[in-house]
Amino acid sequence: MKLSSIYSDKNSRLKISFEVFPPKDKNNYKKLYEELSVLKHFKPEFVSLTWGAGGNDNNSTELIKNIIALGLNVMPHFTCVCSSKDFVKEHIKYLEEYNIQNILALRGDIPENRINCCGDFKYANGLVRFIKSISDLSIGVAGYPEGHIEANSLDEDIKNLKRKVDSGADAIFTQLFFDNDLYFKYVDKVHKADINVPVIPGIMPILSIKQIEKMTNLARITIPEYLADKLDKYKNSNDDIQKFGIEFGINQCKNLLSEGVTGLHFFTLNKSNSTKEILENL
Ligand code: FAD
């Protein structure tokens, strides 16, 4: 089903999706399929598969084929930062051959070393417009409740988000966040900016301190005081961090659902356990 239909479907079922990334080592593909087989029981609308910035697809075409063979729909990501229009056309043709209905259109992070990186697109909105002009794919885009790291302000970032939606995007998938109030305020601002597509919250189960440090170094993500204290308390035990992460995730999702959220997009980090525990307790 297309994004445009999934989130406008008025049945009361929670719309769940799972994000995974292509393992660097092909030997880990089997493990990924096993984790997805566990998550399949939650009847996700789709599995989204990340794409390396700089045109590095890391064999995602093989993964797409195999995830479909598991009986799951796939929403591939695509970053345009170093891509030509011809390359995008070729890739979209491939996706259509596999009856893919949705794509997450991104600019991607600009590589430090720009040699071998001269793409036809400056920002994601150009990619959205181009995909719309050559295909019937339904298009998702990224949104940042705390503002994208390069943006001078959240308002400026939301103006740019509007360009993506006006170019044809059907849904917004957010960066992860740990403070739901920031998400609610963001959705408010997005609606006030006359952006009228669903804003699906991105949920990342807390698996380790290292993971949190990595994410908060890469993006603007606030760690509320309560969370910082707990992470500090459990910092010497990965088991305790994971247990706490599940409890935190359950409370975070319950609160989102109580405020009327109808879709959750989980950044699984290719591990099923915490996401499964969270979903079983909603
Ligand atoms: P854009 O929407 O193009 O925005 C980039 C910056 O430019 C923003 O600061 C924006 O405000 C500004 N901007 C946009 N348009 C204009 C304009 N017309 N004029 C001036 N400024 C403008 N990265 C990957 O490499 N692979 C992935 O698979 C991947 N998946 C992701 C999934 C989700 C749900 C999210 C939230 C992020 C994902 N990312 C991924 C990260 C993303 O690629 C980076 O955050 C990247 O830096 C920005 O991509 P974008 O599509 O949001 O860019």
Image: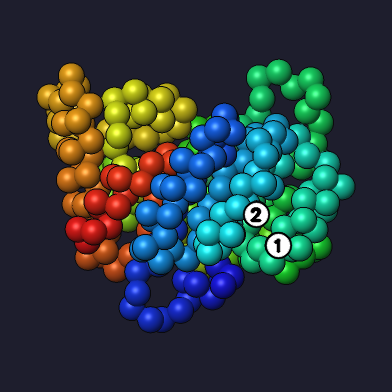
135 displayed left or right of 6: right
According to the picture, the residue beneath numbered tag 2 turns out to be 65
- In the rendered view, tell whether residue 274 sits above or below residue 11: above
The quadrant holding residue 178 is top left
Residue at image location 74% in from the left, 22% down from the top: 114
Indicate the colouring scheme: rainbow
- In the rendered view, tell whether residue 230 sits above or below residue 174: above
Quadrant where the image shows the N terminus: bottom right
Percent across and percent down for residue 150 are: 55, 32
Badge 1 element: loop
Quadrant where the image shows the C terminus: bottom left
Q: Amino acid at mark 2?
A: Lys
Report if the CB atoms under discs 2 and 1 are less than 8 Å apart.
Answer: yes
Residue at image location 26% in from the left, 64% down from the top: 257
Q: Between 152 and 251, which is closer to the camera in this rendering?
A: 251
Q: Amino acid at mark 1?
A: Tyr
Residue at image location 72% in from the left, 58% down from the top: 95
Quarter of the rendered structure image containing ligand 1:
top right
Query: Residue 98 — which label?
Result: 1
2 or 1: tag closer to the N-terminus: 2
